[in-house]
Image (tube, rainbow, N blue to C red):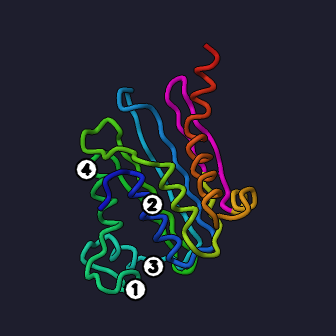
Amino acid sequence: MHFTLSDLMLDIAQNSIESGASHIEIVINERGERSSKNPEFRFSISDNGKGMDKDELERVKDPFVTDGIKHPHRKIGLGLPFLIQTAEQSGGGCDFKSEKGNGTEISAWFDLKNIDTPPVGDLCGALRTILLFEGEHEVSILRSKEDGENSVKYDLLKSGLEDALGGFHDTQSLILLSDYLCSLEVEQEEEEEEVY
């Protein structure tokens, strides 16, 4: 089950990878804290996978429809319907664009002030998991967070991280990857604190 916004994002990214995409782009924007006037968490995931026609796109929004390929034993597909429900009940929304043979883009946004919005969760862990999914595909991540005096902004390429770490095949490289991803989320905040 999805308990956080990071879980939802992870599920959609996994769908992109499983669609046969060779490139997945993840854009994550966060504005304000829950205590600010209009705090929002937004992500979009686009890929160049097999895509869907108009009818398929409507069917995947139905929780009682599944292609039977990803999970052959399941009779329902909850990923996108759960994303839609969570976004809408938390004062946000979703947007879906897809073209058969040309990939898919899914965007979702959430009002962080709404009591029904799940916590953001372990974003570093979700990004690490996405980067570690098997397969020959590139993942680009663009992240920004604006919160008054504190801001975070970075962009990553899976291939660049693999080159820097010599791959993701041993414990040491996985620890370094985790530490690096988490440091990006706090690095700029700590720099601000050191000035005072």
143 drawn magenta:
yes
Q: Which residue is mark 2?
A: 10
First reached walking from the N terminus: tag 4 or tag 1: 1
Marks 4,1: beta carbons within 8 A: no
Q: Quadrant of residue 115?
A: top left
Residue at mark 4 to residue at mark 1: CA–CA distance: 29 Å
- Element carrying mark 2: helix
Mark 1 Cα shell of 10 Å, populated few (<14), some (14-19), many (≥20): few
Task: Mark 1 vs mark 3: give the one in front.
Answer: 1
Residue 59: x percent and y percent? 33, 77
Residue at mark 3 to residue at mark 2: CA–CA distance: 23 Å
Q: Residue furthest front?
A: 171
Region in magenta: 142-158
First reached walking from the N terminus: tag 3 or tag 2: 2
101 drawn magenta:
no
Q: Quadrant of residue 35?
A: top left
First reached walking from the N terminus: tag 2 or tag 4: 2
Numbered circle sitting on residue 89: 4
Q: Which residue is mark 3?
A: 53
> At 50% across and 64% down in the image, what residue appears?
105
